[in-house]
Image (cartoon, rainbow, N blue to C red):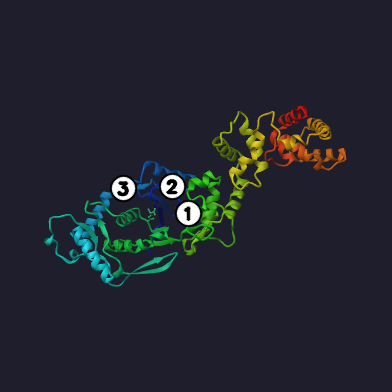
Amino acid sequence: MSDRPVVTRIAPSPTGAMHIGTARTALFNYLYAKHTGGTFLLRIEDTDRERSTEAAVKVIFDGMAWLGMTPDAEPVFQASRAERHREVALDLLERGAAYRDYMTPDELEAEREVARAEGRVVRSPWRDLAPNDAPDRPFVVRLKSPRDGETAVEDQVKGAVRFQNKDLDDLILLRTDGTPTYNLAVVVDDHDMGVTHVIRGDDHLNNAARQTLIYQGMGWEVPAWAHLPMIHGPDGAKLSKRHGAQAVSEFDDMGYLPEAMRNYLTKLGWGHGDDEIFSDAQAAEWFDIRDVVSAPARLDWAKLNHINNHYIRLAEPARLADLVARILKSRDWPLHDGDMDILQRTIPLVRDGAKTTLDLADNVVFALKRRPLELPEKIAGMLNDETRGRLSRLRDRLQSEAAWEVPALEALLRAFAESEGVGLGKIGPALRGVLSGGSPAPDLAGALVSLGKAESLARIDDALSQAQ
Ligand code: GLU
């Protein structure tokens, strides 16, 4: 390999969703570029004009932006480069590395049958005919692949993979209508973009052999290859719908943070000792494509949840409040003035056990409820005379508390229980029910802090004034 500065790229086909396999491939390309001080590029492989809608392209841009992977240059659109692809095919013709094949569809079919019977690949007689024999009819341009020997793909993940040249047919480069084929387009684009490392899914390993022959035909330097194993479901089967989410946007909808996805996806097939959690900077420092393992990686929801919880606990409350507000709006929960403040105050108190931002949303709604709260039967049933008396005495203590903070309120609650000569268990469940209306809520002091003093006292008053 030459010592050209590293250039990597992600080359997704815009087909509707951005699969997490694509996200992980993008991430490995991104990290390897960062690790080597190189350049990370994006190419949209939009040659399938029917599937490549503007909306599908936007899905990729959105997915990349969400994951925080900004390419180092404007994206390249493959379809816009068809003229250049054709130019290279003609260049290959001129170099004698390709030929015009005038086989008619019927002739091709007949040759296919013979080839199948003889257990060999299709060969065109036009490969060895002089061009002045050319008839006036449509032709395809085929690569003149070597017939003997082997083509080795020195893969940085899979090791050396050898292909017998006799098993590789003469690849079509241009179709009869003059449009370039996929493998030609990929090679020309990668070459023109200066790509030094092609890091992609191992479903493209066979293409690497064919693409190598195109590079060689043009006398271009072959890039380093790294073909990544697939991501499998927890049961070891290929990831599919039945395993749950597959698209990047679904992970967003399920309440995973992009930094958690980055951390988790980096670990899918690569690792740094036993480190579970690492920052983007550490990932870039440590990541080497040669350390990717060649066995398929398995999606592990428990690990992903663990990592997501870690980042939820680290995130700025204001950011989480925005995310939770978005979730609540999608659930048609009406948000009012001041609710963002409540969210910011409440989130730090409820986030420790949250695996996702959906959990966070479940855990904050108690604080957003509008008075008077509807008390479920179970809670209303706790409010007998004795409990009401206690609640009312506690209310007075709370009223005179100036420091409305968790430690002060915890101390107050303990002191109150002591003065009543009962354990906190005698007062806790009723107070919690009255404050939360039965929704999930943090510990008592936490619930009081997130509601604020006025709202807490008002909720207690509402409960005390409810008819028995
Ligand atoms: N467009 C191909 C895909 O989405 C990737 C081709 C490549 O990386 O060379 O699978």
The numbered mark, 1 or 2, whose residue comes first in the sequence reads 2
Q: Nearer the viewer, residue 30 or 285?
A: 30
The residue sitting at the bottom extreme is: 149
Determine which of the numbered discs, if any, sits on residue 79 in the image: 3
Pinpoint residue 13: horizontal percent, then vertical percent.
Answer: 38, 50
Position of 365 relative to 173 (above/below) = above
- Name the element at disc 2: loop
- Name the element at disc 3: helix
Confirm whether residue 383 shows in the render: yes
Residue depicted at x 41% and y 46% = 16
Query: For the residue marked with disc 1, what is the amino acid?
Result: Ser
Q: Considering the image in quadrants, where does the N terminus appear?
A: bottom left
Query: For the residue marked with disc 3, what is the amino acid?
Result: Ala
| Figure disc tally | 3
Pinpoint residue 192: horizontal percent, then vertical percent.
Answer: 32, 53
Within 10 Å of disc 1 (Cα), the crowding (few <14, some 14-19, many 20+) is few
Query: For the residue marked with disc 2, what is the amino acid?
Result: Ala
Q: Pointer 1: what residue?
A: 240
Residue depicted at x 30% and y 68% = 167
- In this view, the mark in front (3 or 1): 1
The numbered mark, 3 or 2, whose residue comes first in the sequence reads 2
Left or right of 11 on screen, residue 345 = right
Q: CA distance from mark 3 to mark 2?
A: 19 Å
Q: CA distance from mark 1 to mark 2?
A: 13 Å
Q: Considering the image in quadrants, where does the C terminus appear?
A: top right
Within 10 Å of disc 2 (Cα), the crowding (few <14, some 14-19, many 20+) is many
Within 10 Å of disc 3 (Cα), the crowding (few <14, some 14-19, many 20+) is some
Q: CA distance from mark 3 to mark 1?
A: 29 Å
Confirm whether residue 146 shows in the render: no
- In this view, the mark in front (3 or 2): 2
Q: Pointer 2: what residue?
A: 17
